[in-house]
């Protein structure tokens, strides 16, 4: 196995800058210089993005910036002993020992286990003392290799309790950590019993360090604690008997807990994974207090992401944010059905013509390759493709509603959400009805999941009781009360859009263009896109308004990344090296209708990039509507040219908006924040 750290990846007693950004960039450059990464900027961007999510400083003057990155070619450790120290966000102050963990996207399990093992070693005081006392790079490498091989550090005596902490984590792949009772099932009657789950987005460092810190704190308190680490190097689920015997559960996580329903009914303490490293003793005491409090928050009887109360108290997430998250989840899960189905319908029209809608059902049932219909193979294949696409598009509203409910109530919300969506489609309530039905199903499933029920009934809650009652409630309301009015509103809206011509159609194009460019893949962008695809299947030769809306949305969404790419060519001195590299990729992203390709530019300079993007998007939207451009495909950009009506004007509209946005960005950057070549080129100089 390739050595994870070498002397060329070590910096001793150096000044690498006074910010985490500068230190991470420098270490990323060392990884690339060692031939272990294809580029500095890509690795730095991934690592710094991870740092911005959660600071990687931990108590004891240590920081562990880490990431998975496509730029990394082999698992690597880079280490720096800083002078002066740099603040990486630890509560006890700046850090002098920095370990940069860089893993490839597809790192193998053995390497991931070693990387996780090293992270766990960093909470051992004898190991960190030895690192501080080392006099050479060779000595650092030897110490790290020894830690990975479980050799004791020879340069500092282990403080009292260090051995216990060092051996606290046991089990396959570090998946279970046990303190107190030796049998692992809570057979000894003496100590209190807790279980915990730790997980972080990357699953390399914090996941395992939090587990070890919690176990060590539990040992000191005389508590039996077992931990399930849901990390990258494998996870071994806790024994159901251990969970059943636990007095309370600790979730130290930054991501969803897999299999949360296993802990249903247990008092729970929920916090970010970093708190498990910074304040493990406090979390253990809070869990014990929750176990003694009959009113303590408990894990619901379904795998909901968080209870509403906890969201408000711990995350500060208000109802608007919850609603936005649910809607975006529904749209994101709906898109694969729409994208595939829409393209298939477009191919069906290409082969069979617009009249294929009238004969598709008959052709696919009565004909085959040995009995071709009138018109031959093209008509037969067109009918098959159209029908597959139409059936896929039929899942649009059920999938939207089902996954809105899933975002609110996790898996028990899926069935009632899909049913409510199907009812919405049956009632003619369409896209709007799907949203309403999904919200009703999700919130009812969430509410039922909070009910306190006897232990014998808990197993039936997520698979029978919750789906049954939530389906009756949500779908019953859609049938009896809401479906009719929403269907009437939907029909009126479609009629209004279909009747739009001339100036009113141009106004709609401007509005859709502004929405697509406002937040580049965010909620407003997604609402415009979902609105367009919801009407896609209603388009026809005699009513092309839905297809015009789809073309407008797609064309406007292509403008921001294409414009940013063009702007980096027009005046590259206004952009950093990283932005110029992103600009190269933005050509393809824009051509493919991936608006998110402009996000790196908008994040760096939102007050200039977003208004300029909206200006070009509005122009493109107005032009596509004015010229009657249509699209029978919901995605694909220029690569689905065969599904675009009046493709020349489609391209010209995009070019016009792209040029306007690019010129606006360049002008705003020059006027509002003049930059010289020297100041811009100095950005990567810290590498």
Image: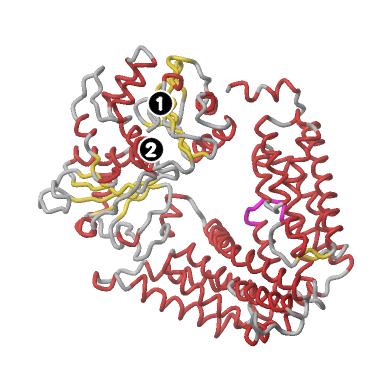
Q: Is residue 125 left or right of residue 612?
A: left
- Residue 131 position (above or below residue 349): above
**Magenta stretch containing residue 496, yes or no?**
no
Report x, y in % for residue 219: 19, 39
Q: Main secondary structure of the magenta part?
A: helix
Q: Please, what secondary structure does the residue beneath circle 2 have?
A: helix
Residue, disc 2: 111
Q: Quadrant of the N terminus?
A: top left
Q: Residues within 10 Å of mark 2 (few under 14, many from 20)?
A: some
Disc marking residue 61? none
Q: How many marks?
A: 2
Q: Is residue 12 above or below residue 496?
A: above
Asked whether residue 485 is in view, the answer is: no
Which residue lies most toward the left here?
Answer: 189
Q: Residue at x 35, y 37 (%)?
A: 116
Residue 410 image point, x, y percent:
44, 63
Magenta extent: 515-524
Determine whether 53 is above or below 520 in the image: above
522 part of magenta stretch: yes
Q: Tell me where residue 362 appears, x and y as whole percent.
A: 67, 87
Mark 1 residue element: loop
Q: Quadrant of the C terminus?
A: top right
Crowd tier of the residue under label 1, counting other residues whose Cα lies within 10 Å: few below 14, some 14–19, many 20 or above = many
Q: Residue at x 53, y 34 (%)?
A: 48
Q: Position of residue 227 (x, y in %)?
A: 27, 47
**Residue extending farthest front:** 370
Residue 621 seen by the camera: yes
Q: Which residue is mark 1?
A: 5
Front in this rendered view, residue 344 or 234: 344
The figure's colour scheme reads secondary structure
Q: Residue at x 29, y 70 (%)?
A: 458
| Front residue of this view, candidates 176 and 370 | 370
């Amino acid at each position: 196995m390739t050595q994870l750290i070498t002397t060329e990846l070590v910096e001793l007693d150096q000044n690498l800058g006074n910010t985490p950004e500068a230190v991470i960039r420098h270490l990323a450059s060392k990884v690339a210089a060692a031939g272990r990464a294809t580029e500095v900027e890509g690795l730095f961007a991934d690592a710094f993005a991870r740092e911005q999510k959660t600071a990687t400083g931990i108590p004891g003057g240590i920081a562990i910036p880490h990431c998975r990155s496509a730029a990394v070619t082999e698992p690597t450790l880079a280490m720096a002993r800083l002078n002066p120290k740099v603040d990486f966000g630890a509560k006890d102050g700046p850090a002098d020992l920095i370990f940069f963990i860089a893993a490839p996207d597809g790192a193998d399990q053995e390497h991931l286990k070693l990387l996780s093992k090293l992270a766990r070693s960093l909470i051992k005081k004898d190991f960190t003392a030895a690192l501080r006392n080392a006099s050479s790079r060779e000595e650092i490498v030897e110490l790290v290799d020894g830690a990975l091989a479980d050799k004791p550090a020879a340069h500092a005596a282990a403080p009292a309790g260090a051995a216990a902490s060092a051996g606290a984590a046991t089990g396959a792949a570090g998946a279970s950590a046990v303190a107190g009772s030796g049998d692992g099932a809570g057979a000894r009657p003496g100590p209190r019993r807790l279980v915990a789950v730790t997980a972080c987005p990357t699953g390399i460092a914090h996941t395992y360090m939090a587990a070890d810190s919690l176990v060590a704190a539990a040992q000191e308190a005389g508590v039996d604690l077992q931990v399930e680490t849901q990390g990258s190097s494998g996870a071994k689920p806790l024994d159901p008997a251990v969970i059943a015997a636990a007095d309370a559960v600790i979730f130290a996580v930054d991501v969803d807990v897999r299999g949360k329903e296993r802990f249903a009914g247990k008092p729970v303490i929920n916090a970010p994974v970093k708190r498990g490293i910074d304040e493990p003793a406090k979390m253990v005491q809070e869990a014990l207090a929750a176990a003694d409090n009959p009113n303590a928050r408990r894990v619901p009887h379904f795998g909901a992401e968080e209870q509403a109360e906890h969201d408000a108290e711990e995350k500060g997430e208000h109802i608007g944010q919850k609603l936005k998250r649910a809607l975006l989840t529904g749209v994101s899960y709906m898109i694969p059905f729409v994208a595939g189905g829409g393209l298939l319908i477009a191919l069906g029209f290409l082969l069979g013509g617009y009249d294929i809608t009238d004969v598709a059902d008959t052709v696919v049932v009565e004909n085959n390759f040995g009995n071709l219909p009138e018109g031959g193979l093209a008509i037969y294949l067109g009918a098959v493709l159209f029908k597959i696409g139409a059936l896929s598009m039929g899942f649009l509203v059920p999938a939207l509603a089902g996954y809105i409910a899933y975002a609110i109530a996790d898996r028990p919300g899926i069935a009632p959400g899909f049913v409510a969506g199907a009812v919405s489609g049956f009632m003619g309530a369409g896209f709007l009805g799907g949203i309403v039905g999904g919200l009703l199903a999700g919130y009812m499933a969430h509410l039922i999941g909070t009910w306190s029920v006897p232990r014998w009934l808990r197993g039936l809650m997520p698979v029978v009781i919750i789906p049954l009652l939530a389906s009756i409630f949500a779908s019953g309301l859609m049938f009896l009360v809401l479906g009719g009015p929403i269907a009437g509103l939907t029909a009126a809206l479609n009629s209004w859009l279909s009747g739009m011509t001339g100036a009113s159609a141009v106004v709609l194009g401007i509005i859709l263009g502004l929405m697509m460019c406002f937040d580049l893949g965010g909620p407003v962008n997604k609402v415009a896109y979902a609105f367009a695809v919801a009407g896609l299947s209603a388009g026809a030769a005699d009513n092309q308004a839905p297809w015009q809306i789809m073309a407008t949305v797609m064309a406007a969404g292509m403008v921001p990344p294409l414009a940013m790419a063009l702007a980096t060519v027009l005046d590259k001195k206004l952009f950093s090296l990283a932005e110029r590299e992103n600009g190269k990729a933005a050509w393809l992203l824009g051509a493919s209708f991936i608006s998110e390709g402009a996000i790196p530019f908008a994040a760096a300079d939102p007050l200039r990039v977003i208004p300029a993007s909206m200006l070009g998007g509005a122009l493109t939207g107005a032009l596509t509507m004015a010229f009657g451009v249509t699209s029978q495909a919901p995605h694909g950009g220029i690569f689905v040219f065969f599904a675009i009506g009046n493709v020349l004007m489609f391209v010209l509209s995009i070019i016009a908006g792209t040029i306007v946005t690019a010129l606006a960005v360049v002008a705003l950057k020059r006027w509002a924040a003049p930059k010289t070549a020297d100041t811009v080129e100095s950005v990567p100089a810290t590498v």
